[in-house]
Image (tube, rainbow, N blue to C red):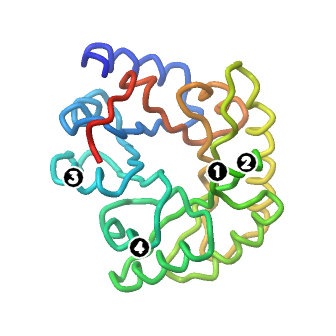
Amino acid sequence: MNSYEQIAKNIERIKKELGGRARLLAATKTVPPEAINFALDCGIDLIGENRVNELLEKYELIDRSRTEIHFIGALQTNKVKYIIDKVDMIHSVDRVSLADEIERQAAKKGIIMPVLAEINIGGEETKSGISPDKAAEFCKYIGSLPHLKLRGLMAIPPKSENFGDNRKYFCEMKKIFIDISALNVDNSIMDILSIGMSDDYIEAAECGSTMVRIGSAIFGKRNYPIG
C-alpha cells in the first residue's frame, strides 16, 4: 500500500483529472480502516467495499459520519441480510433472485435500498451482469419492487492493456443509460452511471460516467490479508 503522503497526492491528482465530471468512489478492498479514515481526511466522501466479511470487520472502525458506504462487489443472496442496514447503495444487482432478496430484507428493516443494475457490457461468460438486450426488462423489474430505488447502471468492461480500448464499451453503456432513463421506470432516479476504474477512469469520465470506482490508483498495489 502507498504511504499516506502518496495517497493524499493521488486523491488530489485524480480529482483534478476528473474535473468534476464524475464522483470519486474510493474502492477500499484490503485497505485498513486507518488508511480509509485518512482518505476521508483528504476529501473522500464515498467508499466502496467488495466483500461482505471484510466490510463487517471494518464497519465499526470506519468514520461513517463522513462517508457513504456502497457495496460494489459480487453479492450472494444469503449475505444480503448482513449488509442491508450497513450500506447506502448496492451496485452489483445482477439477477432477479438478488433483487428479490434485497427487497425482502429491506422490507424487514423498513428501508428503501438504492441500487444499480449491473450490465455485462462485454458479454463475458466469466462476469456477472445482465446482458445489454435484457437491461430494460430487468430495470423495469427492479422498479416493480417497492423497497428498491433504481439509481442507475454499473459495468466492468473487459480487461484491456491499452488506453482507449474500453471507450466503445463506455459509450455503449452511456447509450443504454440514456435509453433506460427515457423509460421513466417506476421507483427510479436514473442519475448514476458507474463505469471506470483505476486504469480507465479518464476515458470513462469522457464518455459520460458519473461515478468512477478507484482503488489501486489511490492506495497502491493491494495486499490480501483480510477475508
Name the residue: 35% across, 74% down: 81
Image position of 50 (left or right of 171): left
Instruction: Classify 10 Å Cα crowding around label 4: few (below 14), some (14-19), many (20 and above).
Output: few
Give above or below for 188 relative to 222.
below
Instruction: Classify 10 Å Cα crowding around label 3: few (below 14), some (14-19), many (20 and above).
Output: some
Instruction: Classify 10 Å Cα crowding around label 1: few (below 14), some (14-19), many (20 and above).
Output: some
The residue beneath circle 3 is 57
Residue 206 x, y percent position in the rendering:
70, 29
The residue beneath circle 2 is 124
Give above or below for 123 relative to 208.
below
Circle 1 SS class: loop
Circle 4 SS class: helix
Circle 3 SS class: helix
Pointers 3 and 2 in contact (C-beta within 8 Å): no
Pointers 2 and 1 in contact (C-beta within 8 Å): yes
Pointers 4 and 1 in contact (C-beta within 8 Å): no
